[in-house]
Image (cartoon, rainbow, N blue to C red):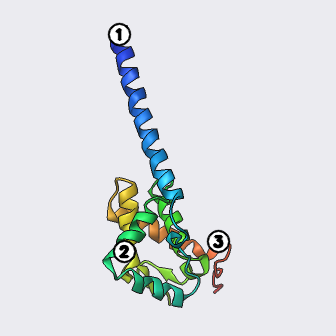
């Protein structure tokens, strides 16, 4: 590759990076300018969780929540899903769920919130619903071990 072509390519990549950074700054300003009522409250109990479930039945509320959760970020899908779930639920509450509902736990895949988590993660990363489900299952699996979790039941 000639030196002129190389310099042109580098300048093109730098201009692209500058545009991406300005887009990210715009999103950040937009996120910081949000009202206090835009804050997502973490569900601590099953009652809080059911209130959240009922609120996302409204398409407008659902879109609003997906938009807010898509700004959470993360380095990969697994990290993003973990951050989303931490915004929505306490570790104690996550400890009461698993994906399928086995072993006296509730099935997270049967809640309406799974679709919100999937949409948020898929909006942030180019991924599939299956990848998001695997990340959710892993996050719920280890919730009892984290601070605030219920702990493991000894047999």
Number of numbered discs: 3
Q: Is residue 30 above or below residue 61?
A: above
Q: Find numbered disc 2 in the image and state the secondary structure of the residue it sits on.
A: helix
Q: Residue at x 34, y 75 (%)?
A: 60
Question: Residue 129's spot in the image, x, y percent?
Answer: 33, 65
Residue at position x 55%, y 80% from top? 43
Q: Quadrant of the N terminus?
A: top left
Q: Tell me whether the residue at label 2 lies in contact with that at label 1, contact meaning CB atoms closer than 8 angstroms.
A: no
In the picture shown, does residue 62 fall above or below 123? below
Question: Which residue carries the number 2 mark?
Answer: 62
Residue 54, quarter of picture: bottom left
Q: Earlier in the sequence, mark 2 or mark 1?
A: 1
Residue depicted at x 61% and y 81%? 92
Residue 146, numbered circle: 3
Measuring from the top left, give residue 152's x and y in whole percent: 63, 80
Q: Quadrant of residue 6?
A: top left
């Amino acid at each position: 590759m000639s030196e002129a072509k190389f310099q042109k390519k580098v300048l093109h990549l730098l201009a692209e990076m500058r545009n991406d950074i300005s887009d990210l700054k715009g999103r950040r300003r937009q996120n910081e300018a949000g009202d206090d009522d835009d804050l997502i409250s973490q569900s601590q109990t099953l009652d809080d969780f059911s209130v959240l479930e009922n609120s996302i039945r409204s398409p407008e509320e659902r879109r609003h929540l997906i938009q807010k959760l898509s700004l959470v970020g993360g380095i990969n899908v697994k990290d993003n899903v973990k951050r989303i779930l931490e915004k929505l639920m306490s570790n104690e509450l996550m400890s009461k769920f698993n994906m399928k509902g086995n072993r006296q736990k509730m099935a997270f895949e049967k809640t309406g919130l799974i679709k919100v988590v999937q949409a948020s993660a898929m909006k942030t990363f180019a991924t599939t619903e299956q990848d998001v489900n695997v990340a959710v299952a892993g996050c719920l699996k280890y919730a009892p071990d984290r601070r605030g979790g219920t702990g493991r039941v000894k047999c």
